[in-house]
Structure formats: structure tokens, C-alpha cells
């Protein structure tokens, strides 16, 4: 579901940019990493805005606790409760022209100001319900930015981070089906 959420937002952002500020290529935003696993700059993301997942956090506020669900036939099933997560997505303008990088970041902010809620469906996980994912601006302190860019292994570039809230992740595999109560005995 995480890959679908990031890919969906990147696709919508590209559509928005192509309508509002047409550019030389249709895919100006890519979901990728700035550095390759061996520590070299990723050449595929030159002159693009890179959407990069930098953290996944469990949302403990909206946590279901009941592991039992009622099936369509009325029986109970033991299924692990879903996990709600928040995603932290960094949008970094990887451009050689600084003014263009600043414009790109301004366009990203304008996009999320225009549209902050997305419906994302994944039939493999839940064929009935779509996930509603809300993006909100997340501001890092200078110390946090320094730590983040050090962990990424790249030099600071114009960027903005968004927190994508309440993405549900769930394994719907049934672990057990408790027997139905057929009689109740009261000891006197």
C-alpha cells in the first residue's frame, strides 16, 4: 500500500505540474532515491523533483484493539488488527539551476495546498474500501534537516517534507475461527 500511495501522489503531482507549468518532460517528479545504495548520486533523477520516503511511523492514537471480526456467515474470525501508519515523504528539487529548484518546490507546495486528501485503492489488500490519505506540511528543525541529509548522504538542496497521515496496512489472513457458543451452563 505504501508504494501505491507514493506512486499515486507522484502521478497526480506530475499531472498538476503539466497543467499549471508545462515543462520539457512530462515526468518532472519521480519516486526514487537521490543516492544509489553504493553512495553515488543517482543519475536517473537529474533535474527532477525526487519524492522519497524517509520515515514510516505507527499512529498509536487510532489503533484498533479488537482482534475479532464477524464474517459474512455470522461466525467470528481472529484477524490481526490493522496498523495505521504515517509516511514522511521528502520532495527534493534535484536541479542544477537553483532558481528552477525553488520554483519546483513552490509548485509542490501549491499542489498540496490545492489538494491535500487522496483516495487510494488496492484491491489486493482491501477490495471494498479505499484509503484516504491526507498530506500536511511537516517542518524540520535545522538540526533534524542536518541529520536527515547526512543520513541520505547528499548535500542540502531545496526541499519540502510532507506527512501523509493514516494509511492502513493490514494482513487479512484469518488466524483462527473460534467455535460458536452453543450452550450456556450456569452452576448453582
Image: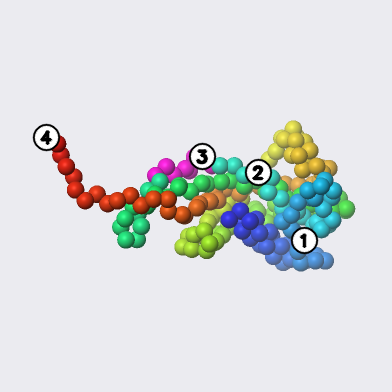
Tell me the SS state at disc 3: loop
Nearer the camera: disc 4 or disc 1: 4
Image quadrant occupied by the C terminus: top left
Q: Check the image and name the residue furthest to the top.
A: 143
Q: Whole-percent x and y of residue 124?
A: 53, 62
Residue 17, picture quadrant: bottom right
Q: Residues within 10 Å of mark 2 (few under 14, many from 20)?
A: few
Is 9 displayed left or right of 122 in the figure? right
Tell me the SS state at disc 4: loop
| Residue drawn where x is 54% and y is 42% of the image | 59
| Residue drawn where x is 49% and y is 59% of the image | 126
Cα–Cα span, label 1 and label 3:
35 Å
Q: Which residue is mark 2?
A: 55
| Residue drawn where x is 68% and y is 62% of the image | 11
Q: Which residue is mark 1?
A: 28
Earlier sequence position, callout 3 versus callout 4? 3
Q: Whole-percent x and y of residue 78?
A: 39, 49
Q: Are marks 1 and 3 in contact (CB under 8 Å)?
A: no
Image quadrant occupied by the N terminus: bottom right
Q: Which mark is residue 60?
A: 3
Range of the magenta residues?
59-66
Amino acid at each position: 500500500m505504501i508504494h501505491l500511495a507514493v506512486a499515486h501522489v507522484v502521478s497526480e503531482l506530475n499531472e498538476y505540474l503539466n497543467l499549471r507549468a508545462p515543462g520539457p518532460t512530462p515526468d518532472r517528479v519521480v519516486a526514487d532515491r537521490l543516492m544509489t545504495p553504493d553512495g553515488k548520486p543517482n543519475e536517473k533523477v537529474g533535474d527532477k523533483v525526487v519524492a522519497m520516503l524517509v520515515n514510516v511511523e505507527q499512529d498509536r492514537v487510532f489503533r484498533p484493539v479488537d482482534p475479532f471480526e464477524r464474517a459474512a456467515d455470522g461466525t467470528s474470525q481472529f484477524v490481526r488488527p490493522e496498523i495505521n501508519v504515517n509516511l514522511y515523504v521528502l520532495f527534493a528539487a534535484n536541479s542544477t539551476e537553483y532558481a528552477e529548484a525553488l520554483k519546483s518546490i513552490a509548485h509542490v507546495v501549491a499542489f498540496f495546498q490545492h489538494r491535500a486528501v487522496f483516495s487510494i485503492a488496492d484491491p489486493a489488500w482491501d477490495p471494498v474500501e479505499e484509503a484516504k490519505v491526507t498530506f500536511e506540511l511537516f517542518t524540520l528543525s535545522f538540526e533534524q534537516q542536518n541529520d536527515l541529509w547526512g543520513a541520505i548522504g547528499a548535500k542540502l538542496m531545496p526541499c519540502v517534507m510532507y506527512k501523509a497521515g493514516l494509511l492502513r496496512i493490514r494482513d487479512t489472513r484469518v488466524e483462527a475461527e473460534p467455535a460458536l457458543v452453543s450452550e450456556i451452563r450456569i452452576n448453582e
